[in-house]
Image: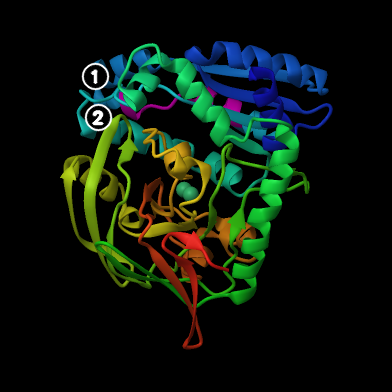
Amino acid sequence: MLKKYAEVVLKIGLNLQKGQRLFIRAPIDARDFVETITDIAYDLGAYDVYVKWSDEVLTKIKLKKASDDALKEVPEWEIKASEDLLNKKAALLSITGGDPDILKDVPPNKIGIAAKARNLAMKDISKRIMSNEISWCVAAYPTEKWAKKVFGTDNSKEKLFEYILKSSRIEGDPVENWKEHISNLQRITNFLNKMQFDFLHYEGPGTDLKVGLPKNHVWISGAQDNSDGITFVPNIPTEEIFTAPHKDQINGIVKNSLPLAYAGNIIDNFTLEFKDGKIVNYKAETGEDVLKTILETDEGAKSLGEVALVPVDSPIYQMKTIFYNTLFDENAASHFAFGRAYSSCIKNGEKLSEEELKAAGLNVSITHVDFMIGNEQMKVTGYKNGEKIVIMENGKWII
Ligand code: ZN
Ligand code: ZN
């Protein structure tokens, strides 16, 4: 199963090409998976495989004990390394997974300082990756502590791995499963792109929100093309179809439907009130101070940069499991994101400057944090020139 999973990551996720470099960012707990991936990558013709290990315990110690100045410092060589690999068109694989509670007793402002410095230092690199200059993919690997958080019991790493494999469609012929899944997503994506709705109206318990969509917005799902025209799948698993909202045309109230796990903290039962694209009021029963930290990152953090639709009949939603990991939780339900929009969500967006993107209605920020709002009661209606079409009813596609 590990081999099949690694194959999907390399063949579907990154679509690794012969002679290409592979750059893997992975936690030390994912060593087995990284070894399998490296082995298969060379068989597929990789030129070289580089691995950058991370250790969540060391990260935590640093956040607790290092000075603010040290937290603000991002080594020049680290930025250079990423730039070099980007220039060489390496494929980038990030492996996620780890203890969702690892940073629980670290003061949120410390996490904020470090995250802000890193986001700022890596701004150009993130921009190049997010505009799909190279193929990139995020996939997960289970750890014992993560499994304990999800299921509440010890020794459940195997069970979590089963859930990861199931949601990643690793059964039967996984490569074939993925081809079919991608084409299903594409059908709806094409419909939404053809409709070019002026705005979407979301209705559900605690939610009544109108979200404007910019002119020439582009809905994206599953597979994307990099700057060399190579098709890749940035997230495994992936269920979402997403675009960018118009940053000045969001009005009403929205309530989250699943907890938001952010930097080891949980934010839950929160309501956001928008006026002309900005959050003017918010409250959270759990983690309000963490929510505040996110919203105060910069101006753009108080608006939205992503509108994503996921039906409640998706395998992850059906598992009725909170993974405390955005890769899974965001693919469980329809969601939005605070902060930065993807430039590829507007026609020719990759070629636009920050000012031009803003003028087109795309949100600019150094952060991007997804939060889930979809559930079985949600209705989504698209409006075009005063005409309306219901696209989701009871949380499911009806188109
Ligand atoms: Zn998303
Ligand atoms: Zn997102």
Q: Which mark is residue 214?
A: none
Residue located 79% across and 21% down the image:
47
Mark 1, other Cα within 10 Å: few <14 / some 14–19 / many ≥20? some
Q: Is residue 240 visible?
A: yes
Q: Give the percent coordinates (x, y) of residue 74.
A: 42, 27
Kindly identify the amino acid type of the residue bearing the numbered disc 2: Lys
Question: Do the numbered discs 2 and 1 sit on residues whose CB atoms are within 8 Å?
Answer: yes
Residue 128, by quadrant, is top right
- Location of residue 22 in the rendering, given as x and y in whole percent from the top left corner: 69, 25
Q: Position of residue 18 (x, y in %)?
A: 84, 28
Give the mark, 2 or 1, whose residue is nearer the N terminus.
1
**Real-space Cα separation, disc 2 to disc 1, in angstroms:** 8 Å
Task: Identify the residue position indicated by label 1 in the image.
Answer: 64
Main SS category, magenta section: helix
Q: Which residue, given by chain and number where applicable, does mark 2 sit on? A: 110
Per the rendered image, the range of residues in magenta is 71-82
Q: Residues within 10 Å of mark 2 (few under 14, many from 20)?
A: some
Q: Look at 81% across and 18% down and name the residue there.
A: 43
Residue 75 on the magenta segment:
yes
Q: Secondary structure at mark 1?
A: helix
Q: Position of residue 159 (x, y in %)?
A: 46, 21
Q: In which image quadrant can residue 3 be found? A: top right
Residue at (68, 39) in percent of width and height: 135
Q: Quick check: can you spot residue 88?
A: no
Q: Nearer the viewer, residue 350 or 307?
A: 307
> Where's the N terminus, which quadrant?
top right
Image quadrant where residue 277 sits? bottom left
Figure quadrant of the C terminus: bottom right
